[in-house]
Amino acid sequence: MSEYFDEAEQRDRAEREAELFARLAQHLPEAVTVSEGLANHLDGHDLSAITSRQALASLPVLRKSQLMEAQAANPPFGGFANADALRGNRVFLSPGPIWEPQGLGADPWLAARALFAAGFRAGDVVHNALSYHMTPGAFIIEEGLRALGCTVFPAGTGNTQMQVEAAAALKPIAYVGTPDYLMTMLDAADEHGFDLSSITKALVSGGALFPSMRASYAERGVRVMQAYATADLGVIAYESAHEGELVDGMMVNEDLIVEIVRPGTDIPVEAGEVGELVVTNFSTAYPLVRFATGDLSASMTDVSPCGRTNMRIRGWMGRADQRTKVKGMFVDPKQIGQLRARHPEITGVRLVVSREGTSDAMVLRVTGEGVDAERVEQTLRDVTKLGGSVETVDSLPNDGKVIADERDYES
């Protein structure tokens, strides 16, 4: 059995680079004919001349805030989606809010390669516990599973007892979902006497996989690997292994161009320097060029010991802005602003994200006279689609932070 999804993973680095930029010089002029928003964004640039990383760096970075503004002015996609690709296809709404269309063809989000690297193979029965509601998370992975030849149980999120009972009956060999929910399922199975020992491998995304969490899964006989994905782009990078041992960092997916830029600028950083990860894809349905993820990472210059030759990054290293992922969903400072606008009695606000056991937790700390914590808590749920508690405090630090991520990513 091959260790690699296809031969592309072992290409000579210079060969891959040349092929990517030869494709890009053809792709960009075509992309702006189907994406009015992208055409406006790149107006004035000779797109056929973008044949190298240096040339690509001359184009402006597209930030999510710009995309959100375009969508608000021209809903739903701000002119960035190919209208022909929407027919007979899915569209999604992620927190922000921001709309995303599904791409064309099998595995449009490029998930199959990451699943293969995590040990998934044709015929595997897989429990998919990502959200099927409004957002594309579950579909990103499901389309990759189906392209790989796996059988998928679309469990979705919530209703843990029913999910455990279903998994005990179906006996899936693999799990996909957020890093912490599998532990919730395993603990519930233990409590109620169900056997989930059939699950021996998992690919997780949508949250932090802490080293202690990975070790706990290993003790229970589950090898867990992770993929770095976004709703806009799909799977950007994924973990790999060599001789059964996890390889440091993450492999950049084939058919994407990844750059690391100085946060808030269009300028690439030096190799190994931490910066904001920006991505260019080759999608004909939703072409994105130098799209800023808002996530921090850094490139790794050495070739992976797993034998894959593509660019490697250190994985997710925090946010370049204050948008923060909680339980697989992004919470944006604009959403906290919306909450504050609904409650004029609030004079100061800070959302604190922490850990409670193996799960993410949110506490909204507010200042002001006459604050009704229960009403504010309901508004927090309304605007973020996530639960959290509300605490009234006398004061907050004067440091400009609206969202404070206090999770420890080293343990």
Image (cartoon, rainbow, N blue to C red):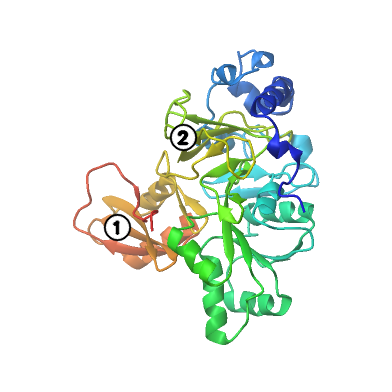
Taking depth in this image into account, of 249 and 31 the one nearest to the observer is: 249
Task: Tell me which amino acid carries mark 2.
Answer: Glu
Pointer 1 and pointer 2: residues touching (CB < 8 Å)?
Answer: no
Vertical placement of 150 versus 59: above or below?
Answer: below
Q: Is mark 2 on a helix, strand or loop?
A: strand
Residue lying furthest left: 394
Picture quadrant of residue 285: top right
Which residue occupies 57% across, 29% down?
290
- Residue 348 in picture, x, y percent from top left: 27, 50
- What kind of element bears circle 1? strand
- Separation of marks 1 and 2 at Cα, in angstroms: 29 Å
Q: Is residue 397 left or right of residue 134?
A: left
Quadrant of the drawing holding the C terminus: bottom left
Q: How crowded is mark 2: few (under 14 residues within 10 Å), some or many (20 or more)?
A: many
Inspect the image, locate mark 1, and give the three-letter code of the amino acid beneath it: Arg
Q: Is residue 362 visible?
A: yes
Number of numbered labels in the structure image: 2
User: Residue 104: which quarter of the image?
Assistant: top right
x, y percent for residue 209: 49, 57
In the picture of the structure, the residue carrying the numbered disc 1 is 365
Relative image position of residue 257 (x, y in whole percent): 62, 31
Foreground residue among 257 and 400: 257
In the rendered structure, find residue 276 and report the number of the disc placed on it: 2
Quadrant of the frame with the N terminus:
bottom right
Image-based side of 340 in relation to 301, left or right: left
Q: Which of marks 1 and 2 is nearer the N terminus?
A: 2
